[in-house]
Amino acid sequence: MPHYHIVEATEAVKPVLGEYFVEPEKSGPIPFHLIKRFIKGTEECLFVEDEGETVYYKNDKSAFE
């Protein structure tokens, strides 16, 4: 779906999801909600190795120390 239709798509999906729809955090002048997500991402450090035919997501903090 093109990003420029996200507002219409959100309004269309709200009735379908009902109580399961969660309103996203609103951004202020400084996007603190993105900083929290960035920190969480760096703590989890998911990556995929470049080797082999079948690859998997891995979480190895020692690889980044």
Image (tube, rainbow, N blue to C red):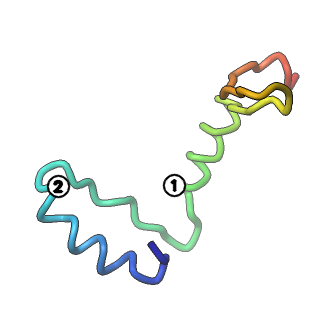
Q: Amino acid at mark 1?
A: His
In this rendering, position of residue 59 left or right of residue 16: right
1 or 2: tag closer to the N-terminus: 2
Q: Please identify the quarter of the rendering in which residue 23 is found.
A: bottom left
Q: Residues within 10 Å of mark 2 (few under 14, many from 20)?
A: few
Identity of the residue drawn at 44% across and 72% down: 1
The front one of 38 and 3 is 3
Q: Amino acid at mark 2?
A: Leu
Residue of label 1:
33
Identity of the residue drawn at 77% across and 28% down: 53
Q: Provide residue 34's location: percent of width, then percent of height.
A: 57, 55
Identity of the residue drawn at 11% across and 56% down: 18
Residue 17, label in figure: 2
Identity of the residue drawn at 18% across and 64% down: 14
Q: Please identify the quarter of the rendering in which residue 22 is found.
A: bottom left
Using the numbered discs, state the Cα–Cα distance from disc 1 to disc 2 in whole angstroms. 23 Å
Q: Provide residue 16's location: percent of width, then percent of height.
A: 14, 60
Answer yes or no: do the residues labelled 1 and 2 have beta carbons within 8 Å?
no
